[in-house]
């Protein structure tokens, strides 16, 4: 299943989720059911309703569907990070030049994929489709970091360095005993001291072999530093923290908070975003946070959400800068709330993203 933008929908594409929308020219609420193949007329209706797009079933579609972040690139990225990590923990080998080159190719592919869709918000659900944590976390952080970097106007070379740092930032964790990484309870101070060394281990290993430049090195080492100096490993503060590290820090914390871990359940997107907004200026760089907020869509179009008034709604449209306040349509009614712009909705907030468990299983099995 992939999210396809409205202007890229084609007749014959098969819907992966129900869509509830209001068609202004017919002045009526419409439902298109999951499993239905889209016709020209229906695509026009979706465009008239100003929907961002629809979730498309790639298996049952009659036409080829291209994902915003290609599946092939994802698989390649995960496999390349995996091989590099295997060499990292194999003391007889170590990370090789070829590993870095392979990761570099993946990074450029991610940049090309994200740069060609400058206007699109990064669908967080779309990049968090898998269970396996460390490698997919690295990919998610790289994708979010590149998206932030594009928003901040970084050059292609900088984006390459930043993406590489994102894919490599947590490699040091593979050398930490799994019982510590997945420990359900609180870490002892000795265990935490071990965890705190993971940015240094990986970065030093790569630097000693002349596999990364100073910028990538500082990006990896500094991804747990905080602006007020309370981070680790070097307690750096403010602009002493490399700009790449400041970007990685936001992407890393967002992905970590919203992921399912053995020691805690995932935070909902609104809480993770509020946590990051709350740490702006003390933990996180303000410019980075603003760029992040303009690029993420924690409630992607087509997702189901619970509202603070108890109603269940479909997300119709996202707005840059207002990730927590999309336009929604209440399921089973004609009511549409534009949470960003309609002043009568100021007291309504999204309280929950309703995950479709059956759908998630299908995604993971793809
Ligand atoms: Fe880390």
Image (cartoon, grey):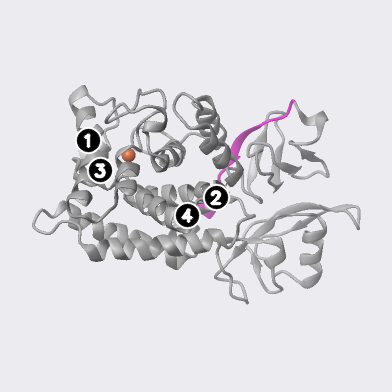
Among numbered discs 3 and 2, the one appearing first in the sequence: 2
Identify the secondary structure beneath mark 3: helix
Taking the image in four quarters, ligand 1 sits in the one at: top left
Q: Is mark 3 within 8 Å of ligand 1?
A: yes
Specify whether residue 349 is painted magenta. Answer: yes
Compared to residue 331, the image places residue 14 above or below, namely below
Compared to residue 307, the image places residue 209 above or below, namely below
- Mark linked to residue 361: 4
Among numbered discs 1 and 3, the one appearing first in the sequence: 3
Identify the secondary structure beneath mark 4: helix
Measuring from the top left, give residue 198's x and y in whole percent: 24, 39
Measuring from the top left, give residue 311's x and y in whole percent: 72, 35
Query: Does the rendering let one see residue 128?
Result: no
**Label 4 neighbour load within 10 Å: few <14, some 14-19, many 20+:** few
Residue corresponding to mark 2: 153
Q: CA distance from mark 4 to mark 3?
A: 27 Å
Residue found farthest to the left: 92
Residue corresponding to mark 1: 197
Considering the image in quadrants, where does the N terminus appear?
A: bottom right
Query: Which dot, 1 or 2, sits closer to the camera?
Result: 2
Query: Which dot, 3 or 2, sits closer to the camera?
Result: 2
Among numbered discs 2 and 4, the one appearing first in the sequence: 2
Left-right relation of 325 to 287: right
Residue range (magenta): 347-361
Residue corresponding to mark 3: 173
Among numbered discs 1 and 2, the one appearing first in the sequence: 2
Do residues under tags 2 and 4 come within 8 Å of each other at their CB atoms?
no
Comparing 218 with 122, the one in front is: 218
Quarter where residue 308 is shown: top right
Q: CA distance from mark 4 to mark 1?
A: 35 Å
Measuring from the top left, give residue 10's x and y in whole percent: 69, 72
């Amino acid at each position: 299943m992939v999210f396809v933008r409205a202007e890229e929908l084609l007749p014959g594409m098969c819907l992966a989720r129900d869509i509830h929308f209001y068609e202004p020219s017919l002045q009526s609420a419409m439902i298109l059911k999951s499993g239905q193949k889209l016709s020209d007329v229906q695509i026009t209706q979706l465009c008239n309703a100003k929907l961002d797009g629809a979730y498309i079933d790639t298996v049952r579609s009659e036409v080829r569907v291209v994902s915003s972040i290609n599946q092939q690139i994802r698989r390649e990225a995960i496999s390349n990070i995996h091989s590099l990590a295997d060499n990292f923990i194999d003391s007889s080998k170590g990370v090789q030049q070829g590993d870095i080159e392979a990761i570099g190719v993946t990074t450029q592919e991610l940049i090309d994929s994200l740069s060609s869709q400058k206007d699109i918000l990064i669908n967080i659900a779309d990049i968090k489709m898998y269970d396996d944590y460390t490698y997919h976390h690295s990919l998610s952080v790289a994708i979010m970091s590149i998206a932030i970097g594009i928003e901040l106007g970084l050059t292609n070379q900088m984006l390459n360095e930043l993406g590489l740092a994102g894919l490599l930032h947590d490699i040091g964790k593979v050398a930490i005993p799994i019982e510590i990484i997945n420990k359900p309870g609180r870490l002892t101070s000795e265990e935490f001291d071990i965890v705190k060394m993971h940015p240094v281990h990986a970065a030093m290993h790569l630097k000693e072999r002349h596999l990364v430049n100073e910028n990538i090195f500082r990006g990896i080492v500094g991804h747990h530093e905080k602006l007020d100096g309370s981070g680790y490993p070097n307690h750096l503060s403010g602009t002493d923290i490399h700009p790449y590290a400041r970007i990685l820090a936001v992407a890393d914390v967002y992905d970590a908070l919203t992921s399912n871990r053995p020691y805690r359940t995932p935070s909902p997107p609104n809480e993770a975003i509020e946590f990051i907004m709350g740490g702006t200026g003390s933990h996180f760089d303000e410019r980075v946070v603003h760029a992040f907020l303009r690029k993420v869509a924690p409630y992607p179009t087509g997702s189901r959400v619970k509202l603070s008034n108890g109603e269940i709604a479909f997300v119709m449209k996202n707005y840059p800068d207002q990730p927590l306040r999309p336009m929604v349509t209440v399921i089973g009614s004609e009511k549409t709330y534009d949470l960003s712009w309609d002043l009568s909705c100021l007291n309504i907030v999204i309280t929950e993203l309703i995950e479709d468990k059956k759908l998630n299983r299908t995604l993971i099995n793809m």
